[in-house]
Image (cartoon, helix red, strand yellow):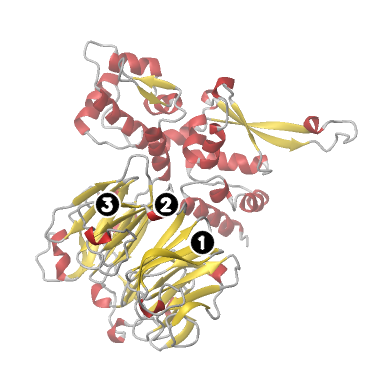
């Protein structure tokens, strides 16, 4: 597979700088000339001729017309959680709850920095406001020149332009350069980088709120009056929403069941008529939507069958048919043949759109690889070292031996026991492949493989996913046990002490798997006294051993496999909160696996 084959674009001529096309416009999907695009985690379009690509846990690349690609790297201890944009501004949220900004200008005071006027694309800048106020940022969303921040779990803050009352602070217009408190008990926030408003849900599952500009009824509240304070949306429950996006004059939402609703301007809402409340789009009624990309006047919707529909600003889209007047109704969009060839694979299609361009790419995101990358970079809980004296690098023994099929002693002797041991740079190149399949230096890695007498390049049977999945079957090498409480109903409560009433069953596992995959287990290990050298840990979740065994197997295989409906009901019920409780990075994949189980066994 070519390294430059997974990113396609279509749109106006200004984006020809990304392709080899000589045409004035890009009327069809055109392959990008950007290299190594299969590592894309997220692509974010700003306004104008630039966009930001998130590739590695703390690295970014900015592509801009008439400029060379710009590269950025956050501090090594920071891992990117999400990126959002508005006009010439990008906000980056990290797992530590911190916010960083990348801005070409700050005309509307959207960057929450005291000296934000000095912002340029030259560097990423740290937003100190939230740390100073002791606020942990859970999520961030941007509207047009405005930012919305969910902090400390449920506290909503907003900053930037308050034109059309879009910040929800009870005022109309003005600039708010530093985030101000809006409301608490907020669970999710939704906006759009061309929108003069936003939506949010609260811990009341029945309610969805909106505020801001409403000239065409785009807030779905049944009127056309602007709202300077949050107002309840009619006929849609907050708990029903999978995703929601705002354009300048309309809004689109997708429900948990995959139905697509819209309201607002008739030419771009997909209905062809003006609507002041969210209305089901007839052309998509029989389709299950899973993704939404929305811009000023354009919409893209992807279904669970990898069918792509577009409408609104459709001269950007290569469609099967153009009989709809001005393409104002959902129209099926042709996919490049490359995507058609890979739709049955594990890779997932991703969509993004800006005011001048639409992007289509395959998401090769591997959460197992991401988890193990973080484990290597953290250097925590390593149980051995490799390298020469003074240049040893801590590693996790089971993982290294699993990938190479060699013992640590054999690796140490072959790489560092001769007259010319490999240097630290070459060792790190080897470990990048070992932990997350990255080949950062082809020549150095080949030299290392030759010293280890391993076949180079690695075969398709020697990938990280396959090696870790095979490791699950290797009970002899499992070095750790999870203790699960099993209540004994035969014991007499009056005769037995509380401690004696509890029996335990053990689930064997490799310790590094728990450390890599679960934030909860990492935190638990932090409390274990290293001097005790314990190889057991107690699980206090009150979940069944069947559920925990399924979860542990998922850590190795990234899939949930069941054979009976009885197991399915139990697993779906007990693991519905696993992403949050066990602090898993791969929320999307895990929840998709649970949805497959529900569909397979027809569970509600």
Distance between mark 3 and mark 2 Cα atoms: 19 Å
Residue 373 position in % (x across, y down): 38, 38
Q: Is residue 525 left or right of residue 23?
A: right
Residue 132: assigned label: 2
Q: State the count of labels.
A: 3
Mark 3 / mark 2, whichever is N-terminal? 3
Residue 158 position in % (x across, y down): 42, 66
Which residue in the protein does label 1 denote? 155
Query: Is 94 located above or below residue 332 in the figure?
Result: above
Q: Is residue 70 left or right of residue 600?
A: left
Query: 234 or 231, which lies in front?
Result: 231
Mark 2 / mark 1, whichever is N-terminal? 2
Which residue in the protein does label 3 denote? 124
Residue located at (31% from left, 84% from top): 324
Residue 250: assigned label: none
| Name of the residue lying farthest toward the right | 494
Residue 6 position in % (x across, y down): 27, 54
Q: Is residue 291 visible?
A: no
> Residue 308 appears in which quarter of the rendering?
bottom left
SS type, badge 3 = loop
């Amino acid at each position: 597979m070519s390294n430059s084959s997974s990113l396609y674009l279509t749109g106006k001529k200004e984006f020809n700088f990304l392709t080899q096309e000589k045409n004035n416009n890009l009327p069809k999907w055109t392959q990008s000339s950007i290299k190594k695009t299969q590592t894309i985690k997220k692509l974010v379009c700003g306004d104008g001729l630039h966009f930001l690509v998130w590739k590695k846990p703390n690295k970014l690349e900015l592509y801009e017309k008439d400029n060379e690609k710009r590269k950025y790297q956050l501090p090594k201890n920071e891992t990117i959680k999400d990126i959002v944009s508005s006009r010439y501004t990008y906000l980056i949220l990290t797992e530590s709850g911190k916010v960083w900004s990348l801005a070409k200008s700050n005309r509307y005071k959207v960057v929450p920095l005291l000296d934000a006027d000095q912002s340029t694309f030259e560097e990423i800048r740290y937003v100190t406001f939230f740390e100073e106020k002791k606020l942990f940022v859970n999520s961030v969303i941007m509207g047009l020149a405005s930012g919305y921040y969910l902090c400390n779990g449920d506290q909503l803050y907003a900053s930037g332009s308050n034109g059309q009352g879009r910040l929800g602070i009870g005022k109309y217009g003005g600039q708010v350069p530093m985030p101000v408190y809006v409301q608490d008990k907020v669970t999710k926030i939704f906006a759009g980088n061309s929108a003069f408003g936003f939506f949010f849900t609260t811990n009341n599952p029945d309610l969805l709120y909106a505020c801001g500009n409403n000239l065409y009824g785009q807030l779905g509240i049944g009127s056309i009056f602007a709202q300077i304070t949050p107002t309840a949306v009619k006929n849609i429950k907050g708990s029903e929403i999978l995703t929601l996006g705002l354009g300048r004059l309309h809004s689109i939402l997708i429900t948990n069941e995959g139905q697509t609703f819209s309201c607002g301007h008739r030419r771009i809402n997909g209905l062809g008529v003006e609507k002041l409340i969210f209305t089901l789009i007839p052309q998509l009624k029989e389709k299950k939507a899973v993704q939404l990309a929305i811009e000023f006047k354009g919409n893209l919707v992807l279904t669970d069958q990898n069918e792509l529909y577009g409408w609104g600003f459709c001269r950007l889209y290569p469609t099967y048919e153009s009989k709809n007047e001005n393409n104002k109704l959902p129209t099926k969009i042709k996919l490049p043949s490359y995507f058609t060839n890979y739709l049955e694979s594990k890779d997932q299609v991703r969509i993004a759109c800006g005011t001048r361009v639409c992007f289509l790419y395959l998401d090769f995101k591997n959460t197992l690889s991401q988890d193990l990358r973080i484990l290597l970079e953290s250097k925590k809980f390593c149980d051995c070292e490799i390298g020469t004296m003074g240049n040893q690098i801590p590693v996790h023994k089971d993982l290294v031996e699993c990938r190479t099929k060699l013992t640590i002693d054999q690796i140490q002797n072959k790489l560092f026991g001769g007259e010319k041991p490999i240097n630290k740079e070459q060792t790190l190149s080897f470990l990048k492949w070992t932990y997350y399949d990255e080949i950062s230096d082809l020549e150095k890695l080949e030299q290392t493989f030759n010293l280890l007498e391993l076949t180079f390049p690695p075969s398709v049977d020697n990938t990280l996913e396959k090696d870790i999945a095979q490791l699950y079957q290797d009970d002899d090498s499992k070095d750790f046990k999870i203790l699960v409480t099993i209540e004994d109903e035969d014991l007499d409560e009056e005769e037995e002490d509380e401690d004696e009433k509890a029996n335990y069953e053990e689930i064997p596992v490799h310790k590094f798997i728990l450390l890599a995959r679960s934030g909860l287990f990492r935190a638990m290990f932090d409390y274990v006294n290293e001097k005790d050298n314990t190889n057991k840990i107690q699980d206090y979740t009150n979940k069944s051993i069947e559920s925990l065994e399924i979860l542990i197997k998922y850590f190795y295989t990234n899939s949930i496999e069941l054979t009976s409906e009885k197991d399915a009901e139990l697993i779906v019920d007990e693991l519905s909160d696993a992403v949050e409780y066990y602090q898993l990075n791969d929320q999307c994949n895990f929840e998709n696996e649970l949805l497959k189980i529900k569909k397979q066994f027809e569970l509600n």
